[in-house]
Amino acid sequence: MAIGEFEYLLLAVASSLQDGAYGASIRKRLQEDGQVRSIGAIHTGLDRLEAKGLIVTRMGEPTAERGGRAKRMVKVTAAGVRAAADFYKMISVASRDARWAEISR
Amino acid sequence: MTRSLEALARLLPCEEREAILGDLCESGVSNLDTGLELLALIVRRWLPPYAGVGDWVCIAFAVIISPLLVGLSAALFAQASLEIHAGSFSGVVELLRLSALLWVASLWVGIAAMSRAWNMAVLTAIAILVPAIACAFRCHGSGLQMGSLFFFAIPTIYGAWIGYRGRHDQRVWLMLTLLLTLILTLITGPPIFSGGYTILNASLLAAPALYCWSIKSFGARHAHS
């Protein structure tokens, strides 16, 4: 399953956050990594990934810090892991002799 | 979170609304940013990426044709009062003919609006009615003059109803209105060369007819799909 750059970012962050992956936490992590994205863009991306079967989502428990609202918890599926790994490999292989590959190491 | 933002969020599906408002609340964004983010998401949801070129053409078409229909509708009513007052038989006949042209064109617009996916149809309908509502607010004339702005809205709404009811009815109506279009265009033909506002009416008529016929021919999505 082919994915785009933003979809890869979402998969990577959701995977690293494990059980704590949901809209606000994904946004916070992206922001820390210098990727400022809106909540709407993140949820639209998650919808797309879910439609492709690369993640599954479920509604979590409501919390006080969210004004008593529930979280949409995200879990990367096996297909999602494969798609992200393929994307990572493709980028790594394609970039191995690129001039910027040395700089970014 | 203000009440207006809560009301705005109601345009989103229930579960998604819960998650989005919670995320925005947790992220600590300002009310203004929350409003903008909600608006952006609602637009994303309402104008889905699957909307094809035909959908956008439909809206553009409605935006262009609607003010013309409003203007023609108002002009017809103004002319009608003069002709009836003067007791000119040929003038009244001309008015009836122009009214028929306007109604056929409006009917086409209505059918076109509801021939798309439902969310695009709603946007098209808004694009059709907004110029009339704007003119009504700016118009300081009598109630009759203001009502004339919506003269075209009756067949448009009826056309939308036909479009909503089903493909079979649409085809029958499209055939009938196409036939009427041809007859009226033939009747309207000679005055086009002598100038006057018949040119506008004929062009008004031709655009919706061509557009509707093309979207029918190339398979438009139905409102129920």
Image: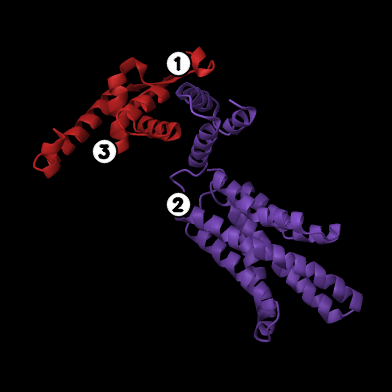
* Residue B137 location, quadrant: bottom right
Give the camera-side residue of A49 and B41: B41
Give the camera-side residue of B217 and B193: B193
Q: Position of residue B217 (x, y in %)?
A: 50, 61
- Amino acid marked by disc 3: Ala
Mark toward the start of the polypeptide (3 vs 1): 3
Q: Is residue B48 above or below residue B93?
A: above
Q: How far apart are marks 1 and 2 (CA)?
A: 36 Å
B15 left or right of B132 in image: left
B54 left or right of A9 in image: right
The answer to whether residue B168 is seen in the rendering is no
Render colour scheme: by chain
Badge 2 local density, few (<14 within 10 Å), some, or many (20+)? few
Q: Where is residue B173 in the image (x, y as percent from the top left)?
A: 65, 59
Which residue corresponds to mark 2?
Answer: B52
Query: What chain letter is assigned to the residue under label 3?
Result: A
Q: Distance between the residues labelled 3 and 1?
A: 29 Å
Give the colour chain A carries in the figure.
Answer: red
Which residue corresponds to mark 3?
Answer: A2
Q: Which of marks 3 and 1 is in front?
A: 1
- Amino acid marked by disc 1: Gly
Per the image, label 1 sits on a secondary structure element best described as loop
Q: Residue at x 8, y 42 (%)?
A: A97
Chain letter for the purple part: B
Q: Mark number for residue B105?
A: none
Q: Position of residue B125 (x, y in %)?
A: 63, 51
B140 left or right of A81 in image: right
Q: Which residue is drawn at 79% across and 61% down?
A: B148
Q: Which of marks 1 and 2 is in front?
A: 1
Q: Where is residue B174 in the image (x, y as percent from the top left)?
A: 61, 61
Badge 1 local density, few (<14 within 10 Å), some, or many (20+)? some
